[in-house]
Image (spheres, rainbow, N blue to C red):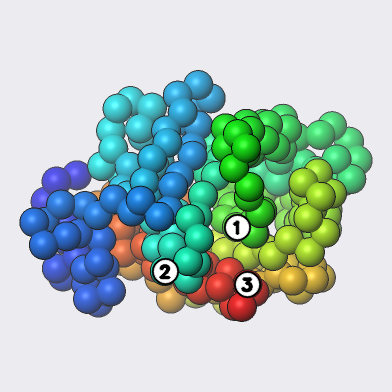
């Protein structure tokens, strides 16, 4: 909401990352649009958003709102600065989905997750849109897990599911050593026990079993509910703009470390 603590405008002035976030606006106070980093994101299954990296590439755009941001913003800024060549971010995102069922990879047995199939289809469509342009699939960034964390039987399987997901995607796109970044489910900061603790352990264990992969801890980026726009939405980091920016930024740095 406008004027809310923890939203983008507030965070760019008042948060501990204000200096780092300054680059998101130009001298005129407008949100920067990067031409060297393009985004392709299918919202709600039918509306394709394409264009230079800026705020607004989120699920809320299905209703016409381009005021929100996800981790793609910080992530894209890091990779845009890293590469001389143009960068394309193909974002796929659907709320409330599990790896246990919704994204279940083929090699895990059982029914292939419908969102695994949709993700692959949307990536293929975005690549086909490039026409004759040469491209290289440079990496995969996975930021997910709340629905698995609240499904007790999913946690013990999660590490293996993650290993299978990466293995299947590497085969699918014929990139055997595709670099992979897994962003920790860091919502609401550090915990010492319980489902969130067990789930984070499974995320990290799975990532460690994948070659050319890095696990990025994000609990430091959690901000208190009272300094955030949506104090009841712990599952969405209380909608804190600084949190989303820092998650993307750190995962971008993680990807950079694999690409060097």
Q: Residue furthest front?
A: 132
Residue 35 vertical placement versus 255 (above, below): above
Residue 67 image offset from top left, x and y in percent: 26, 42
Q: Mark 2 points at which residue?
A: 81
Alpha carbon of mark 2 to alpha carbon of mark 3: how far?
13 Å
Q: Earlier in the sequence, mark 2 or mark 3?
A: 2
State the residue at coordinates (30%, 58%).
241
State the residue at coordinates (42%, 69%).
81
Q: Which of marks 1 and 2 is nearer the N terminus?
A: 2
Residue 114 vertical placement versus 187 (above, below): above
**Which of the two marks, 1 or 2, is nearer to us in this view?**
2
How many residues crowd around disc 3 within 10 Å: few (fewer than 14), some, or many (20 or more)?
some
Alpha carbon of mark 3 to alpha carbon of mark 1: how far?
13 Å
Residue 209 image offset from top left, x and y in percent: 81, 70
Q: Residue furthest left?
A: 28
Q: In this view, does 34 lie to the left or right of 123?
A: left
State the residue at coordinates (83%, 55%).
167
Quarter placement of the N terminus = top left
Quadrant in the rendering for residue 178: bottom right
Residue 216 image offset from top left, x and y in percent: 57, 72
**Which of the two marks, 3 or 1, is nearer to us in this view?**
3
Specify whether residue 236 is in view. no
Q: Earlier in the sequence, mark 3 or mark 1?
A: 1
Is the C-beta separation of discs 1 and 2 under 8 Å?
A: no
Is the C-beta separation of discs 3 and 1 under 8 Å?
A: no
What is the secondary structure assignment of the residue under circle 2? helix
Quarter placement of the C terminus = bottom right
Q: Name the residue under label 3.
A: 259
Q: Name the residue under label 1.
A: 141
Is the C-beta separation of discs 2 and 3 under 8 Å?
A: no
What is the secondary structure assignment of the residue under circle 1? strand
How many residues crowd around disc 2 within 10 Å: few (fewer than 14), some, or many (20 or more)?
few
């Amino acid at each position: 909401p406008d004027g809310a603590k923890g939203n983008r405008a507030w965070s760019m002035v008042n948060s501990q990352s204000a200096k780092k976030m300054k680059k998101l606006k130009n001298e005129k106070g407008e949100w920067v649009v990067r031409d060297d980093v393009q985004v392709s994101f299918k919202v709600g299954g039918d509306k394709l958003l394409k264009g230079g990296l800026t705020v607004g590439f989120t699920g809320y755009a299905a209703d016409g709102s381009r005021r929100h941001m996800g981790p793609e913003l910080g992530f894209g800024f890091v990779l845009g600065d890293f590469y001389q060549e143009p960068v394309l971010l193909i974002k796929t995102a659907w709320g409330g989905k599990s790896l246990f069922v919704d994204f279940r990879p083929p090699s895990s047995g059982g029914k292939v997750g419908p969102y695994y199939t949709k993700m692959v289809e949307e990536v293929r469509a975005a690549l086909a849109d490039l026409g004759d342009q040469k491209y290289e699939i440079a990496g995969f960034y996975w930021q997910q897990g709340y629905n698995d964390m609240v499904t007790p039987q999913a946690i013990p399987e999660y590490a293996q599911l993650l290993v299978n997901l990466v293995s299947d995607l590497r085969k699918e796109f014929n990139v055997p050593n595709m670099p992979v970044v897994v962003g920790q489910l860091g919502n609401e900061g550090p915990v010492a026990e319980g489902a969130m603790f067990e789930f984070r352990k499974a995320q990290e264990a799975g990532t460690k079993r994948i070659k050319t992969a890095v696990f990025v801890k994000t609990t430091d980026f959690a901000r208190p509910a009272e300094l955030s726009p949506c104090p009841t939405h712990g599952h969405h980091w209380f909608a804190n703009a600084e949190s989303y920016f820092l998650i993307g930024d750190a995962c971008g740095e993680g990807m950079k470390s694999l690409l060097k």
